[in-house]
Image (tube, rainbow, N blue to C red):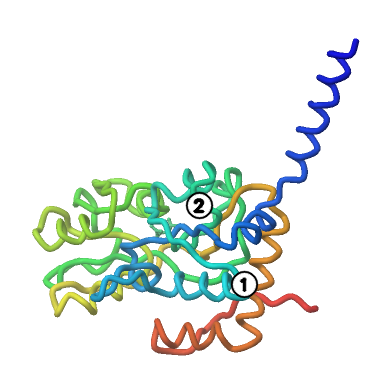
Amino acid sequence: MFTKFMLLFCSCFIFTNVLKADKLADIKKAGVMVAGIKYDFKPFGFINKSGSIVGFDVDLLKYIANSLNVGLKFKQVTSKTRIPMIVSGEVDVAAASMTHKHKRDHVIDFSISYFFDGQAMLVRSDEKETSFRGFENRKVAAIQGATSGNNFKKVQPKAKIIYYQEYPQAVLSLLKGKVDAITTDLVWCVTQAQDSRGKLKVLTETLSYEPYGIGMSENESNLRDYINFAIQDAVRDGFYEKLYIKWFGKKPEKLPEVWPN
Ligand code: GLU
């Protein structure tokens, strides 16, 4: 009888504590937020010439961590690893050029959208084709885990999509002529073209809507609220606009939504 009672007591205790699990409280207690960030997606998350991890996503995370009064520890994620690393708890959050899609929301949760992009195409400067539809039977690179390969197939099902693990490998292949194009979000494409000293250009026809959200575990309502409010604070106090000008050289055309107090 006593054993049965103890078992019931222990199960209730464990159950209540699981229910009370709160990642925001854990982050505050640890004094550090572990954040997944891209190292290969300039200007959102990348390693600069002096070896530091920088970018729009990095600065936004720093703002959030500062407002929470905790430190930040970065862990590298790729398009393929970011969601599994959130699910496994390796990172508390990931700000990683990640489009908030219904499908992804079945696995993790997202903040409000903090950036708005669309999918474009990066090609060599001597490319004659100007339309995405014209890439029938040609090799188009996309990154594993990104939205881009599937999006492109809808526009030109006869393109040969070649998947790469990371963006720099795809750029190298494009420069060497192993693929004819890379398809992904416009801002990355434009940045690569600018850095290429005339070797690459962008086909800016936009084939999808890609709103970025910060990813985190499912059912962490306190953390999600905190991050949503922090993004909105950044808009209200002008930090968001400064950050946008810093990384994109112009004022934002669209701001993240701000809810009334
Ligand atoms: N934003 C798109 C996505 O989430 C493409 C960029 C990326 O690879 O992160 O899949």
Give yes or no for contact between labels 2 and 1 (Cβ–Cβ under 8 Å): no
* Label 1 Cα neighbours within 10 Å, binned few <14 / some 14-19 / many ≥20: few
The quadrant holding residue 93 is bottom right
Q: CA distance from mark 2 to mark 1?
A: 18 Å
Q: Is residue 221 above or below residue 241?
A: above
Element marked by disc 2: loop
**Of the residues shown, which amino acid type is indicated by label 2?**
Val
Name the spot of residue 77 as percent of width and height, x first: 39, 54
Q: Nearer the viewer, residue 208 or 145?
A: 145
49 left or right, relative to 156:
left
The residue under the point 80% across, 78% down is: 261
Looking at the image, which is closer to me, 94 or 145?
94
Location of residue 177 in the rendering, given as x and y in whole percent from the top left corner: 10, 58
> Element at badge 1?
loop
Query: Residue pushed farthest front?
Result: 2
Residue occupying the point 64% across, 66% down: 227
Q: Amino acid at mark 1?
A: Asn
95 and 145: which is toward the camera: 95
> 86 left or right of 169?
right
Q: Is residue 91 left or right of residue 12?
A: left
Relative to 10, is 88 above or below?
A: below
Residue matched to label 2: 91
In this figure, which residue is indicated by the disc labeled 1?
A: 69
Crowd around label 2: few <14 · some 14–19 · many ≥20 (10 Å): many
